Amino acid sequence: MANRARVSDTLWRAVGRQFRRPAGLGGRLMGHVMEWINRAPNREAIAALAIAPADVIVEIGYGPGCAIEALAASAPRGRVYGMDPSPAMLASASRRNREAVASGRVNLSQGDICDLRLAPESVDKILAVNVVYFLDEDGGELKEARRLLKPGGRIALYATDQSVMRRWKFAGPETHRLYGREELFELLLRAGFDPGDIAIRQVDVAFGVTGLVATATKQ
């Protein structure tokens, strides 16, 4: 029984690592899983951004590229940039968005937002869905996101509530940092957003899963 438990724990940790940074065949399979589980969170977070047709948009952790596709459709006269640490997801998202990439409307890269070489205050909207678990606890990446935002620009984060995540064996402390409403609020404060410019609402996405959509506007 003890050996079986250790094997089970090892397998769940491997799943958690694939969520964090998909790689190889498992990563390609994880891309299909992400496409399914992020459908409702993407919809909720993108709606919270209130995208305008000419917006410049960044997605942190674009995964298989489904939200990139939706963002490009929402901003037909704008530009969409995406950063993701996984080469497997870069390949998948590039295939999905090949026409928009070829036209120059979408630019996808491997890395994190700190590797995105854009001028300060050049971005209108930033999206990060089911990514916050993997970001620096001190808000480093979100500080960079805030630096890129224009005055009046907005970031939208989606995270499954920690009360739900604690039930999922793959979301262990080795790979995931869990967030509730208070923790998300504090993270955005550490990134430099003012308390009055942060809003967090609860959403029910599917199968009893409760998530949080947090938005913050740069003044």
Image: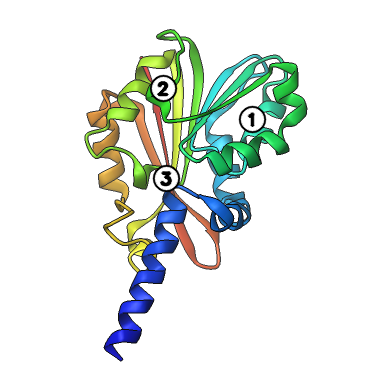
Task: Estimate the x, y position of residue 212 in percent, counting from the top left.
Answer: 42, 48
Colour treatment of the image: rainbow
Q: Which residue occupies the foreground of this view, 165 or 89?
A: 89
Mark 1 and 2 residues: CB-CB less than 8 Å, in contact? no
Task: Estimate the x, y position of residue 27 in percent, counting from the top left.
Answer: 54, 53
Q: CA distance from mark 1 to mark 3?
A: 21 Å
Task: Estimate the x, y position of residue 181 in percent, counting from the top left.
Answer: 31, 48
Say which residue appears at 45% left-offset and 20% top-offset. Answer: 116
Residue type, numbered disc 1: Leu
Task: Estimate the x, y position of residue 24 in percent, counting from the top left.
Answer: 55, 52
Q: Secondary structure at mark 2?
A: helix
The quadrant the C terminus occupies is: top left
Q: Which residue occupies the foreground of this view, 63 or 149?
A: 63
The quadrant the N terminus occupies is: bottom left
Badge nearest the viewer, 2 or 3: 2
Q: CA distance from mark 1 to mark 2?
A: 21 Å
When the figure is inspected, residue 97 is found, relative to residue 144, above or below; the finding is below
Per the image, the residue denoted by label 3 is: 201
When the figure is inspected, residue 136 is found, relative to residue 16, above or below; the finding is above
Q: Quick check: 67 left or right of 157?
A: right
Q: CA distance from mark 2 to mark 3?
A: 30 Å
Residue type, numbered disc 2: Asp
Mark 1 and 3 residues: CB-CB less than 8 Å, in contact? no
Which numbered disc, 1 or 2, marks the residue that appears first in the sequence?
A: 1
Q: Residue furthest right?
A: 99
Instruction: Say whether residue 168 is visible.
Output: no
Q: Which mark is residue 115?
A: 2
Per the image, the residue denoted by label 1 is: 71
